[in-house]
Image (cartoon, rainbow, N blue to C red):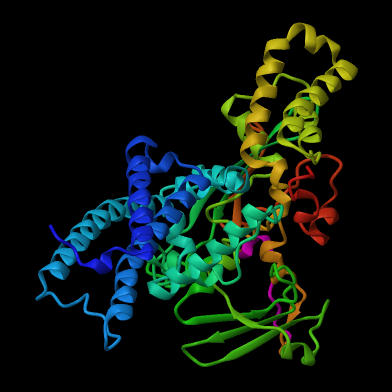
Amino acid sequence: MELPKSFNNKTTKWGIYLSVIAFIVILGLLIFAGNIDEWSVAGILSFVGLVIVWIIGLIMIPLGMSKTEKKSSPDGKSSILNLTNPKYRNAFYVFGLVFIVFLLVTTAGAYKSYHYMESVKFCGTTCHVTMEPEYTAHAKMAHADAKCADCHIGEGVTGFLASKVEASKELIAIVTGTVPHPIYANEGIHEVAKEACEHCHWSQKFQPNRELKHIHFLRDEDNTEWDIDMTMHLAAGTEPLGLQKGIHWHMNKDVKIEYVATDKDNQVIPWVKYTNLKTGKVTIFESDDEPLEKAAFDTLTVTQMSCLDCHSRPAHDFKPAEEFINSRFVTGAISKDLPEFKSAAMAACVEEYGTADSARMMIPKKIISFYEENYPEVLKDKKDELNKSIAAVLDGFTKNVFPDMKVRWDKYYNNLGHMKSNGCFRCHDNHHVAKNDEVIPKTCTTCHTFNAQGTPGEMQFATAGQLMEFKHPGEDVEPEDWQEGLCSDCHAGVGP
């Protein structure tokens, strides 16, 4: 097969060399380097780089021919697209055949790469240390079946491109070692995630009340169990069964709640606006504790309330030590027969450790040291129980605390409730007052009612037609301690 003389030039030859070598290496990677989902970041970047080299090589082939044609042509024009000439037609066929083969191979690899890069495994394991906390937390959440892309990539081409720009910034941070510890969600993620939430959850959907049982263990010698049974009022106000409005009233289609926060984490909210979309009535509540100056509206944003204002950790929640220790008491992984184990375990877990290795070494050491000083007989008579319980504590700790990334429960605000952060009490604090003296209330029964509380066998039960007053466990806690303060002051994972 005879090819045109313009095929014989340095640019075209180098283009052939580059494209052939890149193709061979790409083919070798796809055949011998295992599944793409086992590649490291370097491997994936190498694959992308080879595809770019291959494309550059292909462009150089006709580019070199065209330049050569122009130099040798009297009129300075290129005739490489003149397919009536057998030589140019042969060159076109060769180039076209090679291009199609190369395209099929690289497209297959690119397709597999694209789908892998959209997977949870890629997001969570490729950048192992950086994303390990989020990957671990996601796997144990109710949304574990949802892919990262479902919530972190907006709809349409714009959302996709915006996510890739952000991903490029994150990749540069990983390569240059400038990743923040801990990492925080990008600005705008609330808007993206709100769209994702409403694919499955929507404000018109009826939410019935829900019965909850909370099992706690006190920090006393007997690790005393304290149970609380309650009804959560979740109804959105649609009242198909005659239920009154509940927590999801904030998302009712006839309700619009707006607020102004003075911090980036939306923890300080001095101004709230409620609009009844049916009647048009507007009520503005302002904090009498920290009033917002009128000039502040020039620099602050009025935000419409969305799901994520309460459900702030829907897929990556890090349980506080209080919770993961309690849950292992419930399952029996931690023995209730070890005196003051709850207290000893909490003291060891709330310490901030520099690395995961140091935490795994120091937590058992601190707990054992506690028993050496206070209950030496436990080390002799219940050593196996103690070791098993310590292992359970470490299991909870390693799934919720990641010292290498400085991640733990108090680094991210969980606004669902009012124990881990101020949550509901950011607005429901008895200090947000309207001009007509209406107040956003801070009362237990606004969101839930208590049905039973106490230790098993000695439970106090609510009577029909009467509301049960909450009783705080522990003899050292006075009513005014919790009535006047905020629950999160003590219960943000470090307190009782």
**Residue at the right extreme?**
373
Q: Is residue 112 left or right of residue 92?
A: right
Q: Main secondary structure of the magenta part?
A: loop
Is residue 419 something one can see in this rendering?
Answer: no
- How many labels sit on residues? 0
Q: Position of residue 93 (x, y in %)?
A: 15, 63
Which quarter of the picture shows residue 184? bottom right
The residue drawn where x is 39% and y is 73% is: 157
Instruction: Indicate whether residue 86 is drawn in magenta.
Output: no
Residue occupying the point 33% across, 79% down: 71
Q: Residue at x 73, y 46 (%)?
A: 493
Along the viewing direction, whichever of 340 and 153 lies nearer the viewer: 153
Percent position of residue 270, x then y: 75, 78
Residue 437 higher or lower than 388, as above or below: below
Q: Is residue 371 depicted above or below 450 in this figure? A: above
- The image quadrant where one finds the N terminus is bottom left
Along the viewing direction, whichever of 470 and 259 lies nearer the viewer: 259
Residue 352 in picture, x, y percent from top left: 80, 41
326 or 314: nearer the eye?
A: 314
Q: Residue at x 36, y 35 (%)?
A: 32
Using the rendered view, name the quadrant where residue 201 is placed.
bottom left
Q: Is residue 69 above or below residue 445?
A: below
Which image quarter is the C terminus in? Answer: top right
Residue 24 seen by the camera: yes
> In the figure, residue 334 lies in which quadrant?
top right
Which residue range is magenta in the image?
437-446
Residue at the extreme top of the image, as rendered? 380
